[in-house]
């Protein structure tokens, strides 16, 4: 009730009232865009839950046993976890070092990490392919060529992990940057160092716990990115979860839609988890 | 530092190789390699030229549309009274949908307004039909691209909108300015750099999008990423690999031009604001 008092005692703020009253466009924008975003999701659920006009869950329960699913999804998951680990191993020490010792490098690192955001992945992968083609062309019979071939092992293509780390850089950087800016790393690390902790110990025992929300944030975003990545995998000729969806779409269109709906749900879950963690941190800080 | 080493090997080296090898040619008879601008000349002509124009047109149109719609949505949500729940809902949904690109998105739309889609069937039953609209065309692709571009715009522009202080609006109201005058002289100039920046980001995402287009239209629509994939997968033509490199280099150069333009605009608007 108290909230209504200010509006009832301010009759002279006429222009303000007029401006607020002219808000029909807002309703129109919200309604039109709301429909635009909801209809495809609703239609996908409808499409994938019907067989010969009957309601059925077979396209959802049938996913795990679909031919090739376990293998492709397992591989994508492995790639995702490896990408998360390598990006964090690469970026966490780099960003801590820049924050503490080399602040003048900050803008260079920022620009470099944001490059993959605008650089088309398809252009990057054409370049990677050309480099990989050196192995048979120029280095054949040398250890370097063997290393190149090992990277392209179809059951676990490490080359995808290495390229995905580049694609994930902007997300990892921004997530970690937000965390680093909100804490005083300098004081914390100096305290730890003066108590005799070694640098690796400081990283694992102090920096990692302090930044855990940002680290998790970065990890989830990277996970979502890798699980959905198609361009790099298909151009380099590896089978992952997204390329599997495209493959089965021809013979089982409903299955491909049900998998798509599920992947939306999974992304949603991951991001809700992130925002829940963010809120918990915000609650604790205040 | 390992960071610079990593980027040098996995980002700069591939792009550098692209820039060099696009100027190489393989002789179809002797398989001798030589320096040549044949591939570069070839990609600026004919079908490839059409693909560049198609890509540019599609990404520019969708980026502009998404920028306008995303801005409108962000303003509508932020200005709504008692809109905290709505606001959280829209922001979370934007976060999800901006990441919902690629393959799943294409299949969601196929299930909706594809040939056997739910909405297609519904409109057919109503006797309306799609009125000549096809999902498997440039317009159809545009409609699908907006699905991840609009949320991306909302996500990138909300922080800037929140930076607009309510006091500025109140001051301008108190001085008798109309809504139009406020946006023309206060809100607009402050928002211009972030809006232009966000639009460039949308352009780059639409320009680079490959998975959605691949799953939807195969290679029936002239777009550069599709042409690159075609050139790479064709084992028949000797030297088509080089064509792919030249096409990819063209994309990098175009994105580079856009970024240079963006920095220039950013610098000008910032100077003007001071």
Image (cartoon, coloured by chain):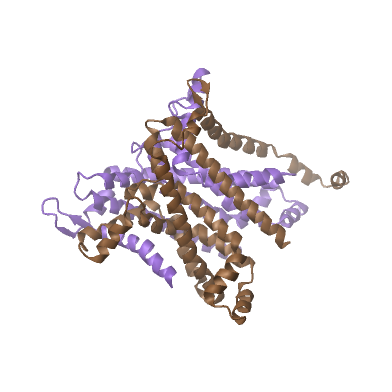
Chain colours: A brown, B purple
Residue located at (55% from left, 73% from top): A201
Judged from this view, the residue extending furthest toward the front is A65
Question: Residue B82: image x %, image y %?
Answer: 75, 44
Judged from this view, the residue extending furthest toward the left is B30
Total number of numbered discs in the rendering: 0
Instruction: Choose top left, top right, bottom left or bottom right for residue B249.
Output: bottom left
Q: Is residue B13 above or below residue B50?
A: below
Q: Is residue A100 above or below residue A219?
A: below
Residue located at (38% from left, 48% from top): A231
Q: Is residue A58 above or below residue B64?
A: above
- In the displayed structure, does residue A241 sit left or right of residue B89? left
Question: Residue A86: image x %, image y %?
Answer: 45, 62
Question: Residue B153: image x %, image y %?
Answer: 55, 48
Q: Nearer the viewer, residue B273 or B50?
A: B50
Whether residue B69 is visible here, answered yes or no, is yes
Whether residue B45 is visible here, answered yes or no, is no
Question: Residue A180: image x %, image y %?
Answer: 59, 67
- In the displayed structure, does residue B88 sit left or right of residue B134? right
Q: Nearer the viewer, residue B166 or B24?
A: B24
- In the displayed structure, does residue A52 sit left or right of residue A185? left
Quadrant where the N terminus of chain B lies?
A: bottom left
- In the displayed structure, does residue B137 sit left or right of residue A130? right
Instruction: Choose top left, top right, bottom left or bottom right for residue B223.
Output: top left
Residue located at (29% from left, 62% from top): A147
């Amino acid at each position: 009730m108290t909230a209504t008092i200010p509006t009832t005692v301010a009759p002279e703020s006429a222009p303000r009232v007029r401006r607020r009253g002219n808000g029909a466009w807002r309703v129109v924008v919200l309604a039109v865009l709301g429909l635009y975003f909801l209809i495809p999701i609703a239609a996908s659920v409808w499409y994938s839950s019907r067989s010969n006009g009957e309601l059925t869950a077979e396209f959802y329960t049938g996913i795990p046993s679909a031919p090739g699913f376990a293998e492709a999804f397992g591989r994508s998951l492995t790639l995702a976890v490896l990408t998360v680990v390598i990006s964090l191993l690469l970026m966490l020490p780099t960003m801590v070092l820049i924050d503490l010792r080399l602040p003048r490098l900050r803008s260079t690192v920022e620009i470099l990490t944001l490059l993959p955001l605008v650089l088309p992945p398809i252009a990057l992968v054409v370049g990677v392919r050309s480099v990989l083609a050196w192995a048979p062309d120029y280095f054949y019979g040398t250890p370097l060529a063997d290393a190149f071939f090992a990277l392209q092992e179809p059951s676990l293509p490490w080359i995808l992990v290495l390229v995905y780390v580049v694609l994930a850089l902007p997300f990892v950087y921004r997530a970690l940057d937000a965390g680093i800016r909100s804490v005083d790393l300098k004081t914390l690390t100096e305290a730890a160092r003066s108590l005799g902790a070694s640098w690796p110990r400081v990283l694992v025992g102090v920096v990692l716990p302090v930044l855990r929300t940002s680290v998790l944030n970065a990890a989830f975003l990277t996970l979502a990115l890798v699980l959905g990545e198609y361009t790099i995998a298909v151009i380099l000729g590896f089978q992952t979860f997204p390329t599997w969806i495209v493959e089965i779409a021809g013979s089982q269109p409903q299955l491909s839609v049900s998998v798509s709906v599920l992947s939306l749900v999974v992304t949603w879950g991951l991001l809700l988890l992130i925002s829940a963690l963010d809120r918990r941190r915000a609650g604790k800080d205040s | 530092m390992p960071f610079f080493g990593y980027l040098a090997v996995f980002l700069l080296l591939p792009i550098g190789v692209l820039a060099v090898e696009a100027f190489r040619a393989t002789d179809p008879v002797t398989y001798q390699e030589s320096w040549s601008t044949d591939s570069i000349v070839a990609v600026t002509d004919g079908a490839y030229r059409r693909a560049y124009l198609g890509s540019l047109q599609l990404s520019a149109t969708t980026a502009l549309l998404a920028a306008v719609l995303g801005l409108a949505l962000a303003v509508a949500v932020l200005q709504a009274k008692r809109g905290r729940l709505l606001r959280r809902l829209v922001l979370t949904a934007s976060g999800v949908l901006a990441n919902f690109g690629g393959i799943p998105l294409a299949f969601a739309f196929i299930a909706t307004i594809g040939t056997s889609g739910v909405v297609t069937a519904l409109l057919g039953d109503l006797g309306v039909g799609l009125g000549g609209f096809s999902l498997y065309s440039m317009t159809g692709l545009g409609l699908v691209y907006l699905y991840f571009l609009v949320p991306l715009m909302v996500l990138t522009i909300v922080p800037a909108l929140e930076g607009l202080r309510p006091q500025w609006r109140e001051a301008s109201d108190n001085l008798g300015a109309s809504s139009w005058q406020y946006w023309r002289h206060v809100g607009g100039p402050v928002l211009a750099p972030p809006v232009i920046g966000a639009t460039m980001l949308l352009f780059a995402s639409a320009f680079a999008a490959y998975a959605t287009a691949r799953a939807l239209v195969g290679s029936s629509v002239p777009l550069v990423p599709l042409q690159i994939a075609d050139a790479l997968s064709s084992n028949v033509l000797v030297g088509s690999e080089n064509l792919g490199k030249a096409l990819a280099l063209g994309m990098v150069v175009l994105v580079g031009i856009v970024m240079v333009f963006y920095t220039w605009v950013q610098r000008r608007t910032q100077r003007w604001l001071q």
